[in-house]
Image: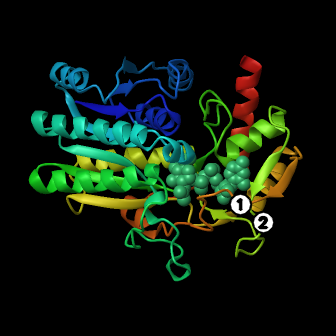
Amino acid sequence: MKVLITGGTGYIGSHTVVELIDNKNDLIILDNLSNSSVDVLDGIKKITGKKPYFIKLDLTDTKATNDFFDNNTDIEAIIHFAAYKAVNESVENPLMYYKNNLISLMNILTNMNKHDIRNLVFSSSCTVYGQPDKNNLPVTENSPIKKANSPYGNTKQISEDIIIDTLSANKNLKAIFLRYFNPIGAHKSSFIGELPLGVPNNLVPFITQTAIGIRKQLNVFGGDYNTPDGTAIRDYINVVDLAKAHVIAINRLINNKNKSQYEIFNLGTGKGVSVLEAIKAFEKSTKVKLNYKIVDRRPGDIEQVWADTSYANSELGWKAETSLEDTMLSAWNWEKYIRNKK
Ligand code: UD1
């Protein structure tokens, strides 16, 4: 029986594929390659010695998706990564986000019902918590779900609801929601990593591109937040550590070790890090000086959020292990690797 990885050539997906292959899971990868490249499969092969079975498919194409499931009846579990994830873009083009992220999920759930595929791990996000109240930091899985601050965030909230409703109508289905904090870094081999198209929105790709000279200056968005150094705080989690949690989650479902029909886990380090601290960690581990400047806040950004990960630690036996410095170094090695390759 196989595990289906949607979005398996993407950033978190590709790192998870490597960990699943190492764990001897048999896989199928689906991706529409809208934000990734087939070359990622070569990177996965270099690391694991195996090129995973890949099909290019757009999950919003209902007929093609149904045909895929009709022709692949040996799937027992799905990790659903495939989604758009850029906050700004979702504000500019909300329908693109609702259409892509929700229709693909509904097509998957329809086929889980039809083909009796019982196990789903869903890529959720800390964005569902919005800006938590100060007395709710760090956030636990029971912290209030606030109104989403972007259509992207809203698709994650709605997706969780769609899954919960589907599960309540079909008691055979089980799901685990993994709420990621801020995934960063790359595989230590440098054969896979994050590959943003165009100007990066996220902090770490912007840092590495500034360090290598593609960007002139890193803008630090906001120096007047109500935080110890005035810059915003996030929980930056190493992408390989994050990937390992997916292996545990999918095997937990396959082996019926889940404690309820759906379970939610925060995946972070449990430590809040400011933008300036992230910059310092990069400079310290790479010995490269960054040209940065504190500028105005970025609209829509929240001030601070970090995870209480005790539930994932105790229940999944999972813990973030890689230090921020080592993670920054992995991101830097990856940036150098891709630029030298070109
Ligand atoms: C957001 C979402 C997250 C989503 C991610 C995907 C929240 C809490 N988080 O992460 O769910 O998966 O986008 O894009 O909604 N920064 C700079 N300069 C830069 C870039 C970023 O100072 O050039 C700062 C930001 O202001 C922020 C921090 O770095 O304080 C992290 O930003 P980023 O990497 O974009 O992630 P989030 O916005 O936290």
Residue at which label 2 appears: 223
Q: Where is residue 285 in the image (x, y as percent from the top left)?
A: 80, 48
* Left or right: where 283 falls relative to 55: right
**Labels in figure, total:** 2
The answer to whether 237 is drawn above or below residue 65 in the figure is below
Query: Which residue is at the front of the view, 187 or 68?
Result: 68
Residue, x 27% and y 56% (percent of image)? 161
Find numbered disc 1 in the image and state the secondary structure of the residue it sits on: loop
Q: Where is residue 297 in the image (x, y as percent from the top left)?
A: 71, 60
Of the numbered discs 1 and 2, the one sitting upstream in the chain is 2
Label 1 is placed on what type of residue? Arg
Q: Position of residue 79 (x, y in %)?
A: 34, 40
Residue at which label 1 appears: 297
Q: Is mark 2 within 8 Å of ligand 1?
A: no
Query: Which residue is at the front of the view, 303 or 298?
Result: 298
Q: Position of residue 58 (x, y in %)?
A: 35, 25
Name the mark nearer the viewer: 1 or 2.
Answer: 1
Give the quadrant of the N terminus: top left
Residue, x 23% and y 35% (percent of image)? 107
